[in-house]
Amino acid sequence: MASDLARALADVVRGEVRFGVAERAVYGQDASNYRQVPRGVVKPADVDDVRAALAVCREFGVPVVARGSGTSIGGQAIGQGAVVLDFRRHLGRVLEVDPDARTARVEPGTVLDELQRAARKFGLRFGPDPSTHSRCTLGGMIGNDACGSHSLAWGRTSDNLHSLDLLLADGTELTATGPLPPAERAALASGHGRLPRLHRELQGLAAGNLPLLRRAMPTLPRRGSGYPLDALLPERGYDLVRAVTGTEGTCALLLGATVRLVPEPPYRALVVAGYPDETAAADAVPALLPFGPLTCEGMAADLVAALLAAGPRPPVLDRLPDGACWLFLETGGDTAAEAADRARGLADAVRRERTATVALVTDPAEQRALWSIREAGAGIVTRLPPASDGTPGGAAWPGWEDSAVPVDQLGSYLRQLRTLLKRHGLRGVPFGHFGEGCVHLRLDFPVRERPQVMREFLTEAADLVVAHGGSLSGEHGDGQARAELLPRMFPPQVIDLFARFKQIWDPENLLNPGLLVDPRPLDADLRFAGRELPLVLAYPQDSGSLLNAVHRCVGVGKCVDTGSGVMCPSYMVTEEERHSTRGRARLLGEMLRGELVTGGWRSPEVREALDLCLGCKGCASDCPVQVDMATYRSEFLYHHYRFRPRPASHYSLGLLPLWLRLAHLAPRAANAALHGRFSGALLKRLGGIDPRRALPALPERRFSSWFRAHRAARPADPAAPAVLLWPDSMSELLDPAPAMAAVQVLEQLGFRVELPSGPVCCGLTRIASGRLDAARRVIRRSLRHLPPGLPVVGLEPSCTATLRGDWPKLLDGPLELLSRVRTLAEFLDEREVALPRLTGEAMTQVHCHQHAVLGTAADRRLTERLGLTNRQLDAGCCGLAGAFGFERGHYEVSVAVAERALLPAVRAAAPGTLLLADGLSCRTQLTQLEPSARPLHLAEVLLRAIGQAGHSPG
């Protein structure tokens, strides 16, 4: 049947129809605890494709699930045996912005940030702003009635909608609008046909149950559970837009929406109030709301601890006032003074609480930095910090992540919730929208060992929130996670009305079945099963388990943000889910599960998805939970090709240091062969190298040969402090200019440069191609040539990052050497050496491994001390990524990655701008794709500065 369905869909859909194993695997999970494998995936090219796909699925009796960015936490974006409609892939345009009417027309797959960018040109914005704003879609927000941190000022999604264009399961279309006067309501319900009947039945449902709906539907602002049937009441004007919003795709498919926009306050100020604990903060909220803040967000010390556990301490934490829980209270105004005055009024109110402390932040950059802590919460709290007794933190899962209570009940609810957690032996990091009583909380449920704990806790937690007059969900919706618990919140008669409401819209139960009506059990379909396999690399943060490692990915989807940043370069240009960090983690998880992806380490689906992984390591730093796909890729390639023939590029580029050493036995002959018309083409073909790539030329002599001659001509000062320069294979054998410059710079600045006693190599090319045993041998041999005690300066970011990041994984433990390894910028910055001035404009392409592993703070400080006005490009990987861009089959992706941001920025730079690029890959990509570019290593820039200052380097 699946093949017949796929063919039928392909016959009528102009977009993509994907029924393969890989696509089903990556669309079988969202950001929830659940796994439901779809029958196939359709990526509609336009709304006609949506109509056509739904008609085919209806004919085959196959359910349909609408999906935006797959960040649903309750399991709303997956469906067992369903056809998933991916609206984000092609239906993501902002069709129109009307600044006079303050509205915008959008397609269902429009990412929120795209709408905000379009509206900002007119001083407007869409009010709701969930933390996933860089990737969540308007269709998904409408499905869950999303809110965000500014709902105090601008309400929920349902408060900001003008009309919805809907497609019902039977093919009927209608435009839902807001409140209507009685005459218009009656007119809708008159006549014959599907639409009048639908309106009659909906109005009859409300009219026949007025007392029940008025009594049994909680009126708190963050009620995100159940169907919003009270929107149908006469006093609400039969508000069909509100009645459909938040129905989680179970009633109709969204074809488009007209949304309302609000004025963007030109200026903002932020009050950060510190309290002794979270209940004190919660108890303080009601007295602060009359001051009209735009936000009132709560964040306890647990969140800060989780942030510190995830990485280095952000300096912005020093701006937090004393306390163990903080409220973020934002004000706006037409002028900076107006925003600050409102903030001072709030700050004065906070100070009247004797136990509270306060900080007033008016600098926009500091405000953004503080908000980044709160926005990162959705990802950060998926990994708990160590407990106060030193017990290691573990993974934390959704399920009770967004309950809500009336604001005046928040303090009591939090106190009793903490007691309930303690009774069940669970830990979590609560934070959230305290101004509306909404609490975010992920918990360390033992989902594999004792899943019954989740059921027991959720049942008791549901009773607790209902006892406080609250809602099971405050903004994420019910999904599979909470729909089973709805009878604990609503009386049986209302549950029956939910079923009637769903049946009116979707009598054949084709749209996202198994959620709000007749829900699947909350502990069924859990995604955590899988087997443990013997591994080569160490996974100390995941108890030596690849299964634990890939389950780090909880689906928050930062890797599918195509706006900027480092992750995930191949996804940014293909926009295919299986090429995202999240998609690859899902495929690896399915490989370990062994049900859908059955090939184990030999899986062609996993190999294909990892083939376009550039190994940039961006996910290891930018993913909120540090999913390290480059490491998982190396592990997979080791097992996949063990005792099997490898791709040609693994023998050529994967062993590049070896071939370069051999070529240097006769460099002129090697250059002739590399660049001969026929011999060069033959070498590329044999080596699996794309014919459009130019092969680099070998230098006349190796760096170590130059160094010996240089040392003979200029003996070192034995009294000068010694530093060991790491002569990586590329600096030694392919591009020695940066290393030569570094030697001269270090000597001019008063250091004595030493080299290892023999050839060294970090092993990166072998690690990247999965030759892990060979890499380990290379590393151990290199260690024998390193003298103890000396600081080690690396010049090539990828090699330096390999020393610091990958060697411990291969050698199964920390190395004393690693504490001595520094980049050139770090080494000079730590010693605060005097530098000459070299004023002017500069632009830096940061190597992705440096961004991910080493950091760039020292480089920023160094270029400032040189007097350069330096812009560090937020362009991510250059696209060459070592061997990646040379390998046959990767050229188009490699060039497209460079053309996203890097090359346009270089072309737009003012004449005379210095272009810094420490990575050889970055410099190679720039010179091959933009011949006018003249990228320099930092060492070469420093040498230029010293020369201009009047020194005479040797």
Image (tube, rainbow, N blue to C red):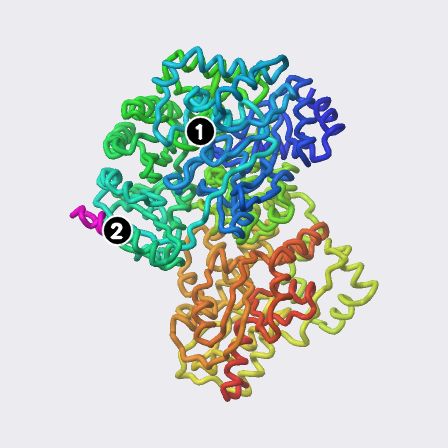
Q: Which mark is residue 419?
A: none
Q: Is residue 445 above or below residue 328?
A: above
Q: Amino acid at mark 2?
A: Gly
For the point 59% across and 79% down, the residue is: 706
Label whose residue precedes the other's in the sequence (2 or 1) = 2
Q: Position of residue 458 (x, y in %)?
A: 35, 25
Crowd rating for badge 1 (residues with CA inside 10 Å; few <14, some 14–19, many 20+): many
Q: How far apart are the two marked residues, 2 and 1, measured between alpha carbons?
A: 35 Å
Would you say residue 790 is visible in this rendering? yes
For the point 57% across and 46% down, the residue is: 633
What span is in magenta?
346-357
User: Does residue 480 show up magenta in the picture?
Assistant: no
Q: In this image, 573 relative to 563: left or right? A: right
Q: Which image quarter is the N terminus in?
A: top right
Residue at numbered disc 1: 477
User: Does residue 355 show up magenta in the picture?
Assistant: yes
Q: Residue furthest left?
A: 354
Residue in the foreground of this view, choosing between 299 and 26: 299
**Could you say which quadrant of the image residue 485 lies in?**
top left
Foreground: disc 2 or disc 1: 2
Crowd rating for badge 2 (residues with CA inside 10 Å; few <14, some 14–19, many 20+): few
Q: Is residue 625 above or below residue 915?
A: above
Q: Position of residue 140 (x, y in %)?
A: 52, 34
Residue at numbered disc 2: 345
Q: Which image quarter is the C terminus in?
A: bottom right
For the point 61% across and 25% down, the residue is: 167
Q: Amino acid at mark 1?
A: Gly
Label 1 element class = loop
Q: In this image, 522 relative to 107: left or right? A: left
Circles 2 and 1, Cβ within 8 Å, touching? The answer is: no
Q: Position of residue 862 (x, y in %)?
A: 45, 72
Q: In this image, 488 relative to 876: left or right? A: left
